[in-house]
Amino acid sequence: MNIAIITGASSGLGAWYARLLDAEGLDELWLIARREKRLQTIAGLIKTPARVLALDLADEDAIRMIEDELATIEAPEVRWLVNCAGFGCIGRAGDIPIATLTQMVQVNCTAPLRLISAALPFMNAGSCILNVASCAAFQPVPGVGVYAATKSFLLSYSRSLGHDLAPQGIGVTAVCPYWIRDTEFISRAETTDAHGLFKNFPFPTDAETVARRSIRAAKNGISVCTPDAVSFLDRIAAKFLPKDLLMSLMGLWHRI
C-alpha cells in the first residue's frame, strides 16, 4: 500500500499538499492535525481514500499512535512524508511563556524528527520527505527568535538527512517560504505580539504556489526550495551579508 503522510493537513499549506498529492495515484493519504472536523472536510474534497488522524503533535504519545497505525497495515510504503505542522509566536525574550516555547520546539523540531524515524523503515527509492521550514531559517530573526531557530534546525537537519539517504534513493527537500497569506500562521503568531514588533507582512506568497513548487522541487531532487521571490532573495542575502546587518534589515522590513 502506497501512502502519503501529511501533518498540519487541516488548513492552509497542509491542505494544499493533500489536494495536490491526491493526483499522485496513492492508495491512501494520511491527514494529521488537531482538528478532526476540518480534516474530515479536506478528506471529502479528495478522491484518494483518506485516513484521518486527529492528533496533537505536541503530545508525546502522538507519534507512537502513528507508529501503531503503520503497524496495522500489510506492507506499507510511505511514498511521501510531509512535515507541515508548525507554529510561531511573535514577542520579545521573556514575553512568551516557556511552556509555549517548549511546545513550539516539540511541534517544529521533535515531531518531524520522530516522524521521519517512524516512516523511514517504510520508505524506498523514489520516496520523498518534505520538511516545511521557513526563510527565517537563513538567519536569526529578532521577535521570532525561537521560531527562526526551530526552522534553522529543520533546514540543517534536512540537508544532512538528504545526504545520508541519497544512496537509498530517498529524497529530502526543505521548503523555505516567506510569509504565506492564506494560512493561520500570522494570525496565531500575532496574538503574543504585545509590543507591535511586526507591523506589516509585505509581499506575502500563497499556499497553493508554495505547495506546487515544493512538490515539483522534491520530484526534481532539489534539497532546498525557496518558492517565492522574497525567500529566494533572503537566501542569497544570508550568504553574503553579516547576520547583525540582516537582523537590522529584517526589523526595518516589518515596520514599513
Image (cartoon, rainbow, N blue to C red):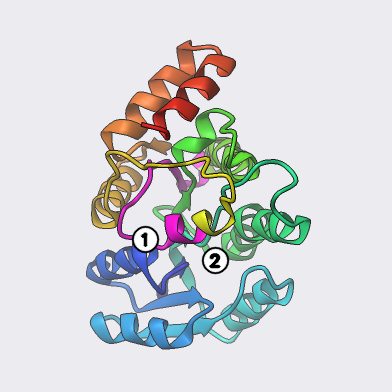
Circle 1 residues within 10 Å: few <14, some 14–19, many ≥20: some
Vertical order, 77 against 27 (above or below): above
Residue 170 lies in the magenta stretch? yes
Circle 2 residues within 10 Å: few <14, some 14–19, many ≥20: some
The residue beneath circle 1 is 183
Vertical order, 111 against 154 (above or below): below
Which residue is at a point 27% across and 71% down the rendered structure image? 22
Vertical order, 158 against 106 (above or below): above
Q: Is residue 1 visible?
A: no
Q: Secondary structure at mark 2?
A: helix
Which residue is at a point 54% across and 59% down the rendered structure image? 191
Which residue is at a point 56% across and 53% down the rendered structure image? 88
Q: What distance separates the C-alpha of mark 1 from that of mark 2? A: 31 Å
The residue beneath circle 2 is 122
Q: Where is residue 74 shown, x and y percent of the image?
A: 52, 83
Front-lying residue, 51 or 202:
202
Identify the mark at residue 217; answer none if there is no mark.
Answer: none
Part of the protein shown in magenta: 166-188
